[in-house]
Structures are given as C-alpha cells and as structure tokens.
Amino acid sequence: MLSAERKLKIAEMVGKSGGIRTSELSGIFSVSEMTVLRDLATLEKQGILTRVYGGAVSSQSFSAETPNIVREKIRTTEKNKIASLASQLIEEGDNIFLDGSTTTHALAKRLHDFRDIKVVTIGLDILNELSGIGGIGVICPGGVLDKVTMNFLGRSTEEFLKNLNSDKAFISTSGISIKAGLTEPNPQQTLVKKIMLENAQQKILLADSSKY
C-alpha cells in the first residue's frame, strides 16, 4: 500500500472512530510504529487529527470528509485516465459545470488548450488552475469556503447555481451505492452537485472503482 493511500485510510478511521492507538494502526497496515508516527505527524500538520500519547484523536475541525490535499495524492493514475477521457467530451463553445473534487481538478488541468469555453466551479483549486488561461471564462459562485475540501458551499452558492445552465456537468462522488445512488458525507456537497446535475443537459460522472 502506498504511503498516501495509508494516510487516507488512517484519516478516515480516526474520523469515524474519534481516535485510535498507534499499535493498532501498526498491526492493521503491517508497518512499524515509527512509520505510523510519521503518518500521524503529517496528518496532524494538515489539521486532520491531534496526536496524543499512544495514538491520535480526531481534530474538532475534521469532518467525515478527507481534505483535498490528501486526496490529490491518491489514485492519481486512475484520475488522470478518467480526466483524459472526460476532456474528449468537451467541445469549443461549451459551458460546463465542474464540482470541486480532485478528479475534476485533474480534468481542469487538461483544459489549457481550449480557446472558447466557460467553466462554472465551486472548487478553489480549479479556480486557481484556470484563472490564468485566456480562452477560458471562469465563474465561481462564492459562498462559504469549506477548508477541508476547498469548495465554496452554502445557501448563497446554491442560489447562485440555480440561475445557471450548462451544456455538461462533470461530477465526482465519494461513493456509489446500488440502493442509495451517489453518496456524499457532507449534505451541502450533495445539494450543490444535485443543482449542477439538474441544470446541465449532459451529466457525466467521474469515478473509479474505489467508489463502489
């Protein structure tokens, strides 16, 4: 297992349980306690958890979501393949919605050669990625910045998006369930993505096998 993937799983475990022991993590991942301590130190710097004697507890600021700064390093090969295929669906003159996920960020990195498209996104990372590209118009609805996902969320974001339409919406998801459909740990994310999908002529889901 890659270091970045192990850190992601540790973050998710601590977020769900509220705390965990270093020795337990060492056994679960079959790595030394020293390796676990280094992982915990990295996650503490990112504000995900707080180290305590013998383990770590969830930071008050940590939600069920994992920060984009962690997710950016996970399954990069899969994300890049998905982004490459998705970019082929975009045509000059398109107005598109991009959510603020790391997979759509990978797609945004492949839009630099376009000369006449408009992008509406809630993702601060995507806004920064595209802001200097002359042929791309970028609209960001603003709202409250969620510092975990670096996405703009909230009532003002939702109201702004309700007044926009697009040719295509590119959306990722935290999980896919046969019974529940697309799932997100944050209900505000769910609402924003629902609006994007409802206001787009074409709806395109970007997800790898880990979402199932």
Image: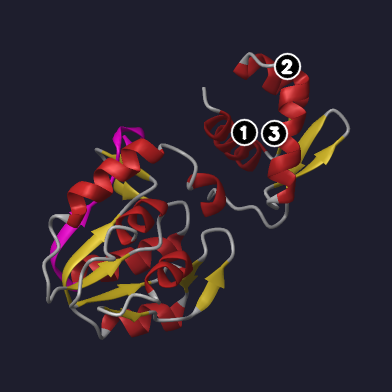
Q: What residue type is labelled 3?
A: Asp
**Above or below, 18 relative to 110:** above
Please name which of the two marks, 3 or 1, marks the residue nearer to the observer.
Answer: 3
Q: Quick check: 83 left or right of 5?
A: left
Q: Is mark 2 on a helix, strand or loop?
A: loop
Where does the C terminus fall, quadrant-wise?
Answer: top left
Residue at 12%, 72% in the rendered image:
92
The residue identified by callout 1 is 10
Going by the numbered disc 1, the residue's amino acid type is: Ile
Marks 3/2 in contact by CB < 8 Å: the verdict is no
- Between 117 and 23, the one nearer to me in the picture: 117
Q: Image point 85% across, 37% down: which residue?
A: 52
Quarter-of-image position of residue 7: top right
Q: Mark 3 points at which residue?
A: 39
Q: Give the range drawn in magenta.
A: 199-212
Instruction: Give residue 11's quadrant in the image.
Output: top right
The answer to whether residue 67 is visible is no
User: Does residue 98 belong to the magenta stretch?
Assistant: no
Which residue is depicted at the point 24% across and 38% down?
178
Q: Distance between the residues labelled 1 and 2?
A: 14 Å
The label nearer to you, 1 versus 2, is 2
Q: Are marks 3 and 1 in contact (CB under 8 Å)?
A: yes
Position of residue 100 measured from the top left corner of the image (x, y, whole percent):
40, 62
Q: Can residue 62 be seen at all in this image of the molecule? A: yes
Q: How crowded is mark 3: few (under 14 residues within 10 Å), some or many (20 or more)?
A: some
- State which quadrant residue 209 falls in: top left
Q: Residue 32 carries which label?
A: 2
Q: Residue 66 carries which label?
A: none
**50 up-or-down from 30: above or below:** below
Amino acid type assigned to the residue bearing label 2 in the image: Ser
